[in-house]
Image (tube, rainbow, N blue to C red):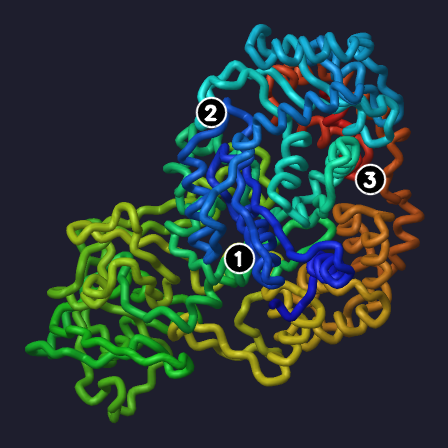
Amino acid sequence: MSESKDFLRTIVEEDLKSGKYKEVVTRFPPEPNGFPHIGHAKSIVINFGIARDYHGRCYLRMDDTNPTTEDTKYVEALKDAVHWLGFDWDDTVYYTSDYFPKLYDYAVALIKMGKAYVDSLNEEEIREYRGTVTEPGRRSKYAQRSVEENLDLFERMKKGEFKDGEHVLRAKIDMSAANMQMRDPLLYRIRHAHHFRTGNTWAVYPMYDFAHCLSDYIEGITHSLCTLEFENNRDIYDWVLDTLELEPPRPYQYEFARLSMNYTVMSKRKLLELVEGKYVNGWDDPRLPTIAGYKRRGYTPESILNFCDQIGVAKANSTVDVAQLEFAIRDDLNTKVPRVMCVLDPLKVTIENYEGSEALDASYYPDDVPKEGSRKMPFSKEIYIDREDFNENPPKGYYRLTPEQPVRLKHAYIITCKEVIKDADGKITEIKAEYHPESKSGSDTSGIKVKSAIQWVDAAQAKKVEVRLYDRLYSSEAPEGMEDLNPNSLQVIKNALVEPAVITEKPDERFQFEREGYFYADPVDYTDEKPVFNKIVGLKDSWSKKKRSSEPVPKPKAKKVQVDGEVVPMNEAEQALFDKYTGELGLNSEVANTLARDTQLSSLYEESLSVFNSPVLLANIVANEVARELKEKQLNELKFNAKQIAQLVKMVDDETISNKIAKQVFEQMAKTGEDPTQIVKTKGLVQISDPAIISPIIDEIIAKNPDNVAKFKAGNTKLLGFFVGQVLKTTGGKANPKVVNELVAEKLK
């Protein structure tokens, strides 16, 4: 069992200890309407992990209640994802459609109890009758139908006598409930569509809120674990089970924070748009956050599991930096995969004073990796190096090959440039060089000093391969639409060269191409005739502007040696801090790495933490905003102190201000040294969460944009972001985004 006990495991332990349940039974219940993504991986790990930790069971159930969007191929993708992550289920995969007859009987029971009725209002009228967050709804006149009439209509709905949308079955609860989900929620709707399992047997299909809780009950689920967007649905979950007075034990729903990650999208609808719009090459495109995409790209199950373990199980939603996932795969592969040579942009080098050929001994792993293995590297007169490893007019600090500067060929000899050959356009086509026989790696007696070692391949025996360099799909941290797609998310190099050992190894093996990153033989397109390698991840994060380099930069600055792109190991004190931050305080590895390696940042963080105990929020602001300030200043030059950082974070923690406002306050605090509480007070930056204040603003914006309202109602749901953005703009970013989202979504129904 995991050493750190999250709040869900605490609940499970208490339930077992009290005798509430004899055995833990969980379930992973996805809808088969798309390929599972990294967010599903988190749910898989939680549900199957808790069942495993407490010697219980976890079922795999397909929530197949919408015949218009579901397909067998999605079922297979979900099964494959669970298996690939290392989990299994009982012999049977369960389907909500297995329970359609039983669910229908439960609906009939509610009708007979006077707790459900057939409503004939249309969709727009139902939305209008529901009311708002500040106004109660009103019940449909059709709620007065007799039990007999409701039973007759519901039976005829089942037989397919009515058109889609002509009638719905609703629960009769409370049209003035504060939780708008409880205002006579829909239980069944008519769908004349072919179901991939039940065919055309049914013309009515249960809604999620009705089917989910009862499926849990039928299967004997004890803990129904779901993400926070279903928090308000818990009241319906309990109402259905309690009203039907089902024989105990019954399940209870608990919510955890969903996984959101920057530079990508998690919405199945948006992922489907990318696939169907041909913006990507299928659901397993290595740029997508789908499990199939990560699998094809070369991520390992262990890296995904470690990532899920690192981010933990929280009660509040937040956005995880994709750099943390990239750190997890680097961390997993670093001690596992062999290092080999690849030249992405070949430049020919002819070693004029070398004759014959030889096979050089070359280890697959550096000395600090506790793994053994080596290969023979062919070496002869003609080799290829990477074009960027030669510079005729080098900038200061360039340590590779130049007309005046020798360089080592890794695992081989030191060479010196003698002549540069160019074509008619002035492009360098060849380097004439000489080697130093006494400089052979492992027995160098030449006395020649070099500052770098570069990769190379033998011209005669190198293998031509296609290399696909994948980068983040979106160039925006919080992508809105297709306009945010990264045009450089895929670069294909068709004439890269690799040493022969790469091709003779198992085709599904992962490699580190020296100084380039980690790569994986594409499991779909790789053939012996056309080897194809996907870039899994670079050796370090080249994107994030928030974090400092993973290589520590001493003060005063010292010269850095460019050798293999390896990260400098932490010293003992730094490692102790890193372990504390990731273990005791629950920080993600990237942030912990930044803090642990910088004494100024770590001391400021520790001091702030002693004032206000909010480890994660404090760590994020110190590792990002404060770190930016320290790039140009020393600690004693800062105009703010640890106490002020703590005050700022406390206001975010208690929702006095939003994260967006916090950044504005920090900028002012950094310039003037003024207390953040005073800045917020003086500028009137307190976050607005009162619906009574926000609602009129939304109404005014909706009234001013009738065309966009019409487009939204016609199906362009992307415009939700437009309305939310207008509200935030109008309030100067002070409106609580969560409240705004809920109110806008409700008003646009």
User: In percent of the image, x 78 and y 49: which residue is there?
Assistant: 664
- Amino acid at pointer 2: Thr
Q: Which residue is mark 2?
A: 198
Percent across and percent down for residue 415 are: 23, 77
Q: Amino acid at mark 3?
A: Lys
Above/below status of 95 relative to 642:
above
Front residue of 243/35: it is 243
Foreground: 158 or 638? 158
* Three-letter amino acid code at the position of disc 1: Leu
> Badge 1 is on which residue?
325
Residue 166 place in picture, x, y as percent: 64, 8
State the separation of the CA atoms marked 3 and 2.
50 Å
| Image quarter (top left, top right, bottom left or bottom right) of the C terminus | top right
Question: Which residue is the site of mark 3?
Answer: 734
Left or right position of 296 against 485: left
Identity of the residue drawn at 25% across and 80% down: 414
404 left or right of 257 in image: left
Q: Earlier in the sequence, mark 3 or mark 2?
A: 2
User: Which of 583 and 686 lies nearest the eye of the viewer?
Assistant: 583
Provide the secondary structure element on which disc 2 rests: loop
